[in-house]
Amino acid sequence: MKVLVLNASPRKDGSTVGILKQIVEGINKEDQIEWIDVSELSIKPCAGCLGCRPNKVCVLPKDDAQIIGRKINEADLLIVGTPVYWSNMAGTLKNLFDRNVTTFEDFSTGSFPKPCQEGKKAVIVAASAAPWPFNGKGAVNSVKTILQAGGYRITGIINYGGSALGKELPQKIAQKARKIGNSL
Ligand SMILES: Cc1cc2nc3c(=O)[nH]c(=O)nc-3n(C[C@H](O)[C@H](O)[C@H](O)COP(=O)(O)O)c2cc1C
């Protein structure tokens, strides 16, 4: 199984990375895992031209958006982790998704958009400073909307609130992450 991890946190010792690492730790060692740091990608913003709809791929000059789009297509399982910024996903991740509309939805049939990743599983991780109920609900819901539009079945969600810089990941969260990894 090909697994693609999209980590949107630029903080290598942060909560998002900590949780993602635990999930990866739990995954079968025979699986092929690729880890992408979204904050290190070079991606121009979406021009809103909708040229991708008939073309099935973004028509802007090739950058990391099309490269990651191909990796998403090739992966059997997608794990998306984001820090919560202003109650939503990190802008870098949103930018990647904006440039990959047709990686998730096929508009070329003329009728209702067809999901492109049907039958695949996905996991969502969000890390925020605020504890429940002010944590990453907005971020999780936004990522979920995109992945479900693509036809993914969301089999695990970790919405970790209450992170503070330098604070260790609670055991309960680490265990939940490993359990999700084991189940994939
Ligand atoms: C630009 C910015 C916006 C943020 N907005 C929120 C927010 O709306 N709610 C929240 O609880 N924390 C917010 N935070 C705090 C981060 O979610 C928190 O530091 C989190 O642990 C970051 O994830 P990381 O540890 O994986 O980097 C924000 C941080 C930044 C830098």
Image: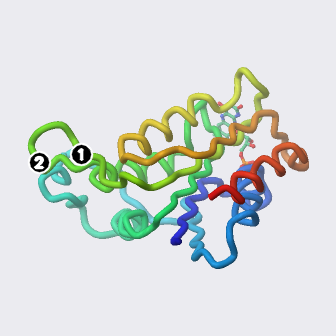
Q: Name the quadrant containing residue 30.
A: bottom right
Q: Which mark is residue 109?
A: 2
Of residues 133 and 110, which is closer to you in this image? 110
Which amino acid type is marked by label 2?
A: Thr
* Residue 99 in the image, given as x and y percentages of width and height: 34, 53
Q: Distance between the residues labelled 1 and 2?
A: 8 Å
**SS at badge 1:** strand
**SS at badge 2:** loop
**Looking at the picture, does residue 67 appear above or below residue 172?**
below
Q: Do tag 1 and tag 2 residues touch (Cβ < 8 Å)?
A: yes
Residue at the image position 53 percent from the left and 71 percent from the top:
1
Which amino acid type is marked by label 1?
A: Lys
**Looking at the picture, does residue 36 appear above or below residue 80?**
below
* Residue 128 in the image, given as x and y percentages of width and height: 72, 37
Q: Mark 1 vs mark 2: which is more N-terminal? A: 2
Q: Which mark is residue 114?
A: 1
Of residues 30 and 71, which is closer to you in this image? 30
* Residue 173 in the image, given as x and y percentages of width and height: 82, 45
* Residue 65 in the image, given as x and y percentages of width and height: 38, 62
Colour scheme of the picture: rainbow
Q: Is mark 1 within 8 Å of ligand 1?
A: no
Of residues 121 and 113, which is closer to you in this image? 121
Of residues 21 and 90, which is closer to you in this image? 21
